[in-house]
Image (spheres, rainbow, N blue to C red):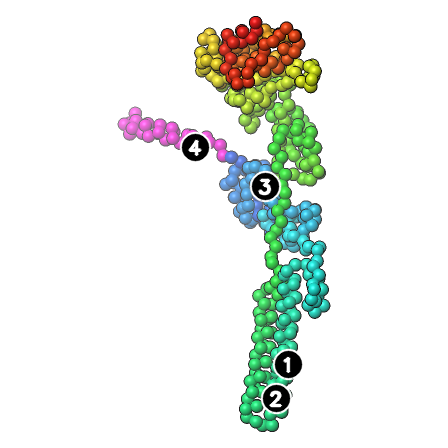
Amino acid sequence: MPKLSIKLFPLLAMMVLFLSPFAVQAETTCACFCATKNGAVQASDAKVTPDKCESLCEKSGSDFLSCAKTAREYPGNNALCFTAVDCEKVKGKLSATQPPECPTGMKNCFPGSQAVKAKLNVKIGTLETVEDLGTYVSAVYSWMLGAAAVIAVVFIMIGGLQWVLSAGGASSVATAKSRIKNGIVGLLLLISVSLILQTVNPELLKLQVPKPSLLRQIVLADSSCEKLVQEGYTIETEQSAKKECGTSAIIKKDPSGNAVADGLTCQYTKCAKGACVGGPGNEQCVECRYVSAGNPSSPGSASPSVCKMMETSVYEDQITNGIRYLKNATYCTFGKGGLAGVEGLQTSTDVSITHDACLEYKVDCHSINDCEGYDDIKVDYYNNGSLTTGELRDVNETVFGFLCISDPCGVKGKSSDIVGCSLDSASTGLNSAECDNIFK
């Protein structure tokens, strides 16, 4: 092999090492929209990359508007864009022109005129009531403009009469000429001002302040499909799709029958057992005991919030005086890995939670008739590559201690002979010896 080729190996290896991550990196796709004189249109039914979107808009002879990755970025969710029905609901006036950033048929909506009118104490010509300050000032300006024109004409007439009656007197004629000249100049100035304002913008003569477009309320639902259906939302699901964990659906209308934001979807979270957890596209039903950082098949990592969502409790009024006690429950609490032997957390040196995990334990109050019943509670969790069962006291004594203190099954009320199962609320750490004293 030539020496030149051998020397090239390190260079080629470095190129593969540094360039390969970029070569395989997947580009994000989005819904492509272009701005046209007829409004915003979707350039492609399928989702494309941002570069492809710009190319499609340029090819169609329109401007690039947006490449929407979320529902908020859809043109139909622009708060400045109204349908005729939406604008009528807020008693506004729809603009005559089609904004290019709004979908076809959706336009800006401007505030309508106020129905309340104020009565003037002093009439301005024939005007007796006004709707706003602009109308009042405009009426005063028009009246003063007419009055000034009349005064200018009167001055011209007085000057002409003074000239006729001057009998040739030089000083009187000069005064008359000056008065006529000033009247004509004043009249021309008044006409010029009105003509200039009319030419620049006729609205300036009305003295009406420009009104900004109204903002439309956008409904962006953020919940599971099951909860939205229960609240009255209209959900559209594909006929072949199952309404279970990980299935998405399109949200069409809110409980009032109004259309919600374009492109808005929800996720079904129904599970026969456990809870629906995992990232987008990786959702699946999983039971509490299998959620662990050490479980390769776990769709998500254990955390206090993830563990908490898997708890189920049923209560019944089995004690008098209005106190409700637990009937049965499946608890799921978070266990921090690597805490073997730490006082108040994992007290048994024989127990070691290798990774963060969700700890599952069940409390059936029908089988717990005294304080010793709490000592028999088992806990299941995924540890060291397999499902493990242990004593709740050994795995997490803090949780076990609070269970003893709170007495959720109300065993103290079931037997008059029992006086334990209750500690001062300030006692947060309960070791085995203290719990044993309670059971005696």
* Residue in the foreground of this view, choosing between 61 and 165: 165
Gap between marks 4 and 3 measured at Cα: 29 Å
- Give the image location of residue 425, x and y in percent: 55, 18
* Mark 1, secondary structure of its residue: helix
- Give the image location of residue 209, x and y in percent: 60, 58
* Mark 2, secondary structure of its residue: helix
Mark 1: which amino acid?
Val
| Residue furthest top in the image | 440
Q: Which mark is residue 78?
A: none
Q: Which residue is drawn at 59% across and 41% down?
A: 74
Mark 3: which amino acid?
Tyr
Mark 3 neighbour class, 10 Å CA radius: few under 14, some 14 to 19, many 20 or more: many
Mark 3 or mark 2: whose residue is earlier in sequence: 3
Q: Residue 74 carries which label?
A: 3
Gap between marks 3 and 1 measured at Cα: 65 Å
**Pointer 2: what residue?**
162
Q: Which residue is drawn at 44% across and 32% down?
A: 23
* Mark 4, secondary structure of its residue: helix
Residue 433 vs 124, above or below: the answer is: above
Mark 4 or mark 2: whose residue is earlier in sequence: 4
**Pointer 1: what residue?**
154
Q: Is the magenta stretch mostly helix, strand or loop?
A: helix
How many numbered markers are drawn?
4
Q: Nearer the viewer, mark 4 or mark 2?
A: 2
Q: Which of marks 3 and 2 is in front?
A: 2
Task: Determine which quarter of the picture holds residue 248.
Answer: top right
Mark 4 or mark 1: whose residue is earlier in sequence: 4
Q: Nearer the viewer, mark 4 or mark 3?
A: 3
| Residue interval drawn in magenta | 1-27
Whether tag 2 and tag 1 are in contact, CB under 8 A, the answer is no
Quarter of the image that includes the C terminus: top right
**Pointer 4: what residue?**
22
